[in-house]
Image: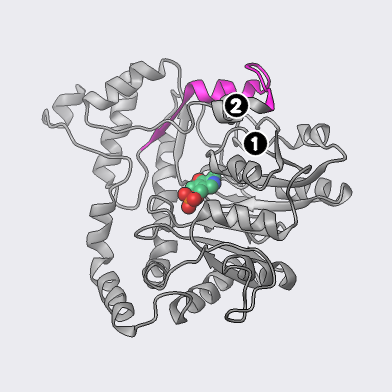
Amino acid sequence: MDFNLAYGGIILNIPLLDLKKEYELYGKNIEKAVVEVLQSGSYILGDKVKQFEREMANYLGVQYAAGVANGTDALLLALEALDIGEEDEVITTPFTFFATAEAIAKVGAKPVFVDIEPDTYNIEVKKLEGAITKKTKAIIVVHLFGMAAEMDSIMEIASLHHLKVIEDACQAIGTEYKGKRVGSIGDVGCFSFFPTKNLGAFGDGGLVVTNHPEIHEKICRLRNHGSIEKYIHTSIGMNSRLDEIQAAILLEKLKLLDMFLFKRIVVANKYFQELHHVKRKPPQYTDKRHTYHQYCVEVEERDRLIRFLNQKGIATGIYYPIPLHLQKAFQNLQYQQGDFPVSENVAKHILALPINPTLTVKEQEYIIQAMKEFAGVLP
Ligand SMILES: *Cc1c(COP(=O)(O)O)cnc(C)c1O
């Protein structure tokens, strides 16, 4: 069957994410919640933030949660709360969003990269111990695209070497590992509510979670100028708070989160069943609940496929085109091309396809048809 005939010659226009279309689903409730905050006279660290922190702690299965200004600050504050700074090394992956390693460098510590697993794109546990030195203080584990990292092995290695574990769960809210929500497994978990994340604010927002009361207390102090009691400052902190308006919005959107994650999983399962001709697609593991912040496949001839899909009105994305060890900002670390071959290879082939809560069945079928047409496998 000819592709264009099947769709009556109509070119659909399918973005990666459509926040405007999503807004139509919940806009009324958000507007009500925002107006309530506007009328309340309380805009910073008020009741909405407290309620959101309680609900998030409950959702994630942790004791404590602290709202902060964004996901990058969440990582920064986590590192500071664990006393990580100059002379320290922190292990992480070169295949993540820049902010993961940026936060390490920002506190004065040295990012040490370990290559990724070729199927999950998360840190390769087998290579972890080889990167540990006397200076290593912590590991920042990234649950990339919503796929949980191998937490049991990572926690075991960390405990053996007395290292702290920070989970960068910015792309993985609601992701599960052996029945536990990620962010709740390491010493500290960090989340982002950047608008495009699976739980997005209408601006910036972040969260730091932990089961350790002393870490939580420190985070709450550091996010607010080193102060818990007004005008009493016990350390140098910063200004990094989640504001009341964003908290009120997030409380509304939290009600829809599980339904939205479920829709992503349904879309991902369909891609999994239908896309037989890609080089690699996200594996499905029974002990992990992937939440598909991105649905990334690996393909040969990526540039040609991108152009082909674009002509059909289908948007795609590349996360991430350059691994962090090859970024100019980290050239002082003196890594070279070839140091992390898996990350470098994935960066050349990976391609994100549209996945979001408003993607329709018809739109997804159209994308699948286009992928099949490109592969030359349409009957
Ligand atoms: C988005 C993201 C961050 C940073 O979050 P912001 O809220 O944008 O500061 C950090 N790490 C990862 C893996 C992310 O995806």
User: Residue 317's spot in the image, x, y percent?
Assistant: 38, 33
Disc 2 target residue: 343
Judged left or right of residue 369, residue 225 is right
Q: Can residue 11 be seen in this view?
A: yes
Which residue is painted at 54% across and 38% down in the image? Answer: 98
Q: Are marks 2 and 1 in contact (CB under 8 Å)?
A: yes
Q: Residue placed at 34% from the left, 20% from the top?
A: 305
Numbered badge on residue 29 = none
Q: Is residue 345 above or below residue 173?
A: above
Q: Is residue 336 inside the magenta stretch?
A: yes
Checking the image for residue 93, the label placed there is 1
Q: Of residues 199 and 111, which is closer to you in this image? A: 111
Is disc 2 surrounded by few (<14), some (14 to 19) or many (20+) residues within 10 Å? many
Q: As rendered, which of 154 and 100 lies closer to the eye?
A: 100
In the figure, 138 relative to 92: above or below? below
| Label 2: element kind | helix
Q: Is residue 146 visible?
A: no
Q: Position of residue 31 (x, y in %)?
A: 25, 71
**Residue span colored magenta:** 333-353
